[in-house]
Image (tube, rainbow, N blue to C red):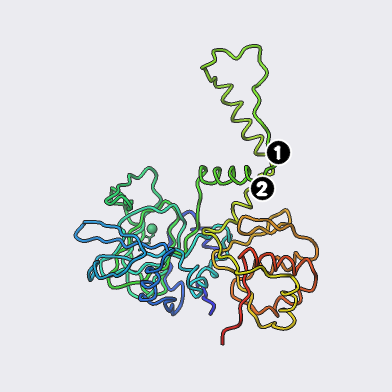
Amino acid sequence: MRLKLNVDIQQFLAEAWQQQPRLIRGAFSQFDDLVEPEILAGLALEEGVDSRVIENHNGQWNVSHGPFESYDQFGEDGWTLLVQSVNEWIPEVQQLIAPFRFLPDWRIDDVMISFATENGGVGPHLDQYDVFIIQGGGKRHWQVGARVHNATEICPHPDLKQLQDSFEPIIDAVLEPGDMLYIPAGCPHNGVALEPSLNYSVGFRAPNTAELAAAVADSLSQLEVPLPRYRDAQASSYGQPFNVTAEQLSHVREFLLQSLAQTDIDHAMLLVLSQSKRPLPQADGLLHAEELAQFIVEQPDMLLVRTPGARILIGPNSTLYANGEAWPLNEHNTALAEAIAQLWDDQPLSTFAPLLQNQPSVLLCCELINAGVLDIVAQQD
Ligand code: SIN
Ligand code: CO
């Protein structure tokens, strides 16, 4: 099933993306829930699934972390179950990302789904993500403000951050199924369920300087490439040994900036951007190129599947990046690489057969399967 987003993309990018919150009524016509609340609740019973219940009983906030054994203790109302990365567990939910692929794939974080009982909510807060919140079944009252700087955050519970002060809403609306909010990172918001309600948050990560620099530095150090090493500026005297002068500081800063410009930082960045949020599931055994070639001929209706959560990117250096690894491309396998990077819905192997007629392409596909980035599975009836 393809979900169609009723949004003027050009206008959205020009006027709202990373700038202004938006309420888009009927963003998805006749939106049917992609999960039942019971299935979501069942998922949060599983080990390895990142879930929380946030309760608000008369202003007393509490946070409990999954996996849960039961929900009886939370009572009838005033609580919300939030489950992260549901797209990685429930294939139907992965479909909700497809309409947002007018944005770069590497920015996609996950689909978080919340089920709120009446009056449930997480309180007024900021997120460090750009997020689209789609209303599923039920109704929720949302307030969203313009981006704030230096807002004071408080923790009514050690695992819950909220805003200390109220904010001026520029959106104040009750969302119904298929309606969508776009909330740029750093805009205050608060949603309170008016009745049992499901919300889908398609999140786009927006790393800060420290997060990005730390990840790129880590990637550079693992590449084992020769890196420039610091040297003091030539001088007849360095002054007092305990003083670090403004000139010396600027020399260190210059060293960092220049060596980043010289080093193959693009490659390190692409490796970082292609890393999956969680380790990809590993294949049971290694697939050999001959076996894949045989499947293409003998079982062309087997499905080629993009592993949910895998980030498959192609860099300007003709290299495919996925799962923090790199595959240099050549004239033979570039077309296949592009088709694979484009792939979102499962497709029969036969769709790819014309692109899998040469050894470099078969090898690339095979290696991506062995890396857990792709999978081939039998067609379900
Ligand atoms: C929720 O779905 O309950 C919270 C989503 C958010 O405010 O980010
Ligand atoms: Co939020």
Q: Position of residue 90 (x, y in %)?
A: 48, 73
Q: Secondary structure at mark 2?
A: helix
x, y percentage for residue 297? Answer: 75, 81
Residue wearing tag 1:
226
Q: Quadrant of the C terminus?
A: bottom right
Label 1 and label 2: CA atoms lie apart by: 15 Å
Return the residue found at the far front: 285
User: Relative to residue 113, is residue 163 depicted above or below?
Assistant: above
Q: Amino acid at mark 1?
A: Pro
Q: Secondary structure at mark 1?
A: loop
Report if the beta carbon of the residue with label 2 is closer than 8 angstroms to ligand 2.
no
In the visual, does 99 lie left or right of 146? Answer: right
Q: Residues within 10 Å of mark 2 (few under 14, many from 20)?
A: some
User: In terms of depth relative to the viewer, which is nearer, 162 or 35?
Assistant: 35
User: Residue 178 is drawn in which quadrant?
Assistant: bottom left
Q: Of the residues under marks 1 and 2, which one precedes in the sequence?
A: 1
Q: Residue at coordinates 31% horizontally, 50% vertically from top-left?
A: 158
Q: Residue at x 51, y 46 (%)?
A: 211
Residue 170 got which mark?
A: none
Quadrant position of residue 347:
bottom right
Q: Which residue is mark 2?
A: 266
Q: Circle 1: is it few (<14), some (14-19), or many (20+) Cα within 10 Å?
A: few
* Above or below, comparing residue 315 to residue 98 in the picture: above
The three-letter code of the residue at mark 2 reads Asp
Measured as percent of width and height from the top left, residue 192 is found at 29, 64
